[in-house]
Image (spheres, rainbow, N blue to C red):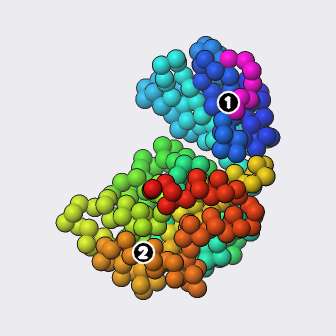
């Protein structure tokens, strides 16, 4: 057993989301969104280097020394998995390990809006899950993909950096590819995927114009595409997609997005009122005819009003979701104010 394994195991057992390892401080764990020490002992640069060197392969160690950063997956003997990011900083090496639960949680456990089940029944179109880091985007997408895998006879391809949740063939056939190990870029893998007879394609994250263009093409041509962006709301997501394009191409991008978008789900994870778990608040945009017209026109400032009256189609504003959680006693008034998009803008 590697020296780090016991700390990683302790982090997982205590339901921590991340373990931070760096010189000059004790092992730190993020629990319910907050950092706290996992140990009392302060690690030296030599100890951190030894911890990291022990768990890396010769190839990974060489990559770290050549590029000064490394993204990968580390798995314990009991199957617990962590997304690992190693870097060099002023005191030596440092690493962060994000815990990836082995079990994929169901819709009901996560409290996902019912309309997301309808998204999973679609035979083509683009679904975007958005939110800040640690907002649960990967967990939500894993639940959606698992539902499709369990209920539909499809060919599913995932393109990730790195592979996080592991999926196994159920009713569907599923192929998972990782950047670095199986492909050189999201765009390369997506271009190849479109020639591999997929029904559903998951792209871990849209990072550039080329990948966005290929994702829209895939959604236009009879595939379901799931992906993520780091945006805080549905209108901001539409603007982000369009602004990836040069000004001369933005009108066409608006038209394409209006035609192939299924929906946008923005989410935040909030510590519950009892202080012992996290609950999710969701904003949902469903691409109705009215929404499509707004996207085509570029008048995203009108989107909030359309969403406000679109509850029958499954739409919901973040403010309404927060208010529902508050009324149900699941979050405090302080948390309601802290996570309000309106409060943030004020």
Q: Is residue 148 left or right of residue 198?
A: right
Residue lying at 68% horizontally and 26% vertically, measured from the top left: 27
Q: Residue 323 occupies which quadrant of the picture? A: bottom right
**Extent of the magenta region:** 36-42
* x then y, percent, for residue 138: 59, 55
Depth check: 224 or 9 in front?
9
Location of residue 20 with respect to 120 vertically, above or below: above
**Badge 2 or badge 1: first in the primary sequence:** 1
Q: Which image quadrant: the N terminus?
A: top right
The residue wearing badge 2 is 303
Q: Select label 2 or label 1 by which is in front.
A: 2
Residue lying at the far left in this picture: please name it: 248
**Distance from the alpha carbon under mark 2 to that under mark 1:** 41 Å
The spot of residue 218 in percent (x, y) is 42, 70
Crowd rating for badge 2 (residues with CA inside 10 Å; few <14, some 14–19, many 20+):
some
- The residue that appears at 67% across and 47% down in the rendered structure is 100
Residue depicted at x 42% and y 47%: 184
Q: Secondary structure at mark 2?
A: helix
Residue occupied by mark 1: 28
SS under mark 1: strand
Marking on residue 175? none
């Amino acid at each position: 057993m590697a020296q780090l394994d016991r700390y990683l195991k302790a982090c997982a057992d205590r339901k921590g989301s991340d373990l931070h390892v760096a010189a000059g401080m004790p092992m730190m764990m993020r629990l319910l969104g907050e950092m706290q020490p996992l140990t009392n002992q302060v690690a030296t640069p030599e100890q951190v280097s030894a911890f990291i060197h022990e768990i890396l392969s010769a190839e990974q160690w060489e990559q770290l020394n050549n590029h000064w950063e490394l993204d990968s997956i580390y798995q314990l003997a009991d199957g617990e998995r962590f997304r690992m990011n190693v870097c060099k900083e002023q005191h030596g090496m440092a690493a962060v390990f994000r815990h990836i639960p082995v079990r994929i949680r169901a819709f009901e456990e996560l409290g996902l809006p019912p309309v997301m089940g309808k998204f999973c029944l679609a035979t083509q179109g683009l679904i975007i899950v958005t939110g800040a880091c640690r907002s649960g985007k990967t967990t939500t997408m894993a639940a959606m993909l698992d539902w499709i895998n369990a209920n539909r006879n499809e060919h599913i391809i995932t393109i990730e950096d790195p592979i996080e949740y592991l999926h196994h063939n159920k009713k569907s056939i599923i192929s998972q590819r990782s950047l670095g190990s199986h492909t050189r870029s999201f765009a390369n893998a997506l271009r190849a995927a479109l020639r591999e007879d997929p029904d559903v394609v998951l792209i871990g994250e849209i990072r550039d114009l080329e990948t966005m263009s290929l994702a829209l093409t895939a959604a236009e041509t009879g595939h379901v595409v799931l992906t993520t962006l780091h945006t805080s709301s549905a209108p901001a997501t539409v603007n982000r997609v369009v602004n990836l394009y040069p000004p001369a191409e933005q009108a066409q991008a608006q038209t394409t997005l209006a035609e192939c978008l299924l929906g946008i789900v923005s989410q935040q994870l909030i510590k519950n009122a009892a202080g012992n778990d996290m609950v999710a608040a969701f904003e949902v945009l469903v691409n109705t005819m009215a929404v499509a017209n707004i996207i085509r026109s570029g008048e995203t400032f009108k989107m909030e009003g359309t969403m406000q009256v679109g509850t029958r189609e499954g739409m919901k504003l973040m403010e309404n979701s927060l208010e529902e959680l508050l009324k149900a006693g699941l979050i405090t008034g302080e948390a309601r104010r802290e996570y309000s998009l309106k409060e943030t803008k004020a």
